[in-house]
Image: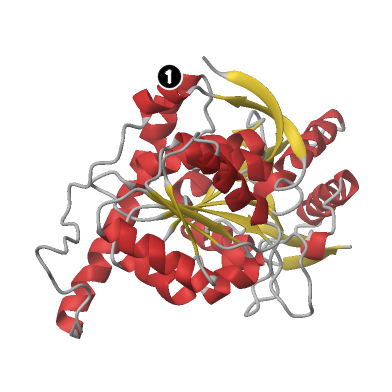
Amino acid sequence: MSKIKAMTGNQSASIGACLSRPDVIAAYPITPQSSVVEGLAAMIADGKSDAQMVQVESEHSAMSVVQGSAMAGGRVFTATSAQGLALMYEPYFRMSTLRLPMVMAIATREMTSPETVWSGQQDAMSVRESGWIQVFVENNQEILDMIIQGYKISEDKDVLIPMNVCYDGFYLSHLTERVEIPSQEQVDEFLPRYKCEHVAYDPQNPMAVDPLTPGEILINYRENHLQSMQKVKDIIEKVDREFKEKFGRSYGGLIDTYRCEDAEIVVVTIGANVGTTRVAVDLAREKGKKVVLIKVRFMRPFPNEKIAEVLSNKKGYAVIDRSVSFGWNSGVLYQEVKAAVSDLNQNLCSISAIGGLGGLDISLNHVMSVIDVLDKAIKEEKQGQLQTMWLK
């Protein structure tokens, strides 16, 4: 039987991981993630988990340890943030291209420099092309639920791709919300113990892992990886439906939408500020502005078809980012949405709004101002002209 508890996002991540029954956890602390692995260490010490905790000297080692354990057929978990993610990048990239399933939590944070430890999404956004599945969540309940779902998605025989559960550092990692915790029996029915069906490393039968690979073979690996990443889209939707049947909660699959009826303009966002944006949409509707919200959940695979479907026949869209695309005068999510709607042959007004960097809040007034600017641009027929707003 499930129970209700007030807990932080990091506690939600720890409990979600524990309920998923990992075999091996590798731990190295970094703000704002540290209490995730601390919580798991306490659960193991208290006999609530039979996982083996490996304390390592760096994040690079943490990913290397879980990589070896996954090769041996184990279910594995770790968590990190920012500079820790940067340090583990070599085995992090290798984890996905070796097609080893796992779940790793990222309590998102700005990247140094200037020196900062506060919230932002630049760390996770910067590794989106590393071959991992990436989900960005809105609240602490979604953290717990998506870690459990993450294993079911990642370990599917048609997927075998590791998954990041990304949540806003401090805004979720350290703040407390009501969370419903399912029982171990419920989770076991939904997510049985992992049985590795592909070839696993066996010391009694040595094999070469990742030998030097020529281009004519490597290109096939990349093709297969991309094809599997597209298959993930259907599996995400399927697992979301199965989760709703078992636990009564659905998150919409690849994206979620709010107030689609008679919509003319679209606000797209991601992560913890989705809740604020919902309130802004309600207020804009009261003022006669027909606004719809798109909550992007998965950055990889990117839900381009779903987003294009919602934006079809709309007048314009604004994307609120908590990260920047250094090669463009815009946010990262904006570029992804722009690419998704490029085949619509519609000359839409568009705004890239960037805020929430370095721990700054994206306030209700910020979101309302974005809607007002977009509405004005549509009325002035500024189609095709990108406007960039800095939400300070």
The quadrant the C terminus occupies is bottom right
| Residue 253 in view | no
Up/down of 4 relative to 85, above or below: above
Q: Which residue is drawn at 31% across and 57% down?
A: 70
The image shows residue 118, relative to residue 169, as above or below, that is below
Residue assigned mark 1:
245
Identify which residue is drawn at 32% across, 67% down.
97
- Count all numbered tags in the image, as a single digit: 1
- Give the residue type at disc 1: Glu
- Residue placed farthest to the top in the image? 1
Specify whether residue 116 is in view.
Answer: yes
Residue 241 found in image quarter: top left
Above or below, comparing residue 53 to residue 241 in the picture: below
Residue at image coords 59%, 69%: 84
Dot 1 lies on which element?
A: helix
Residue 120 in picture, x, y percent from top left: 72, 61
Q: Which of 23 and 375 is in front in this view?
A: 23
Q: Position of residue 331 (x, y in %)?
A: 67, 66
x%, y% of residue 237?
40, 36
Q: Residue at x 31, y 46 (%)?
A: 155
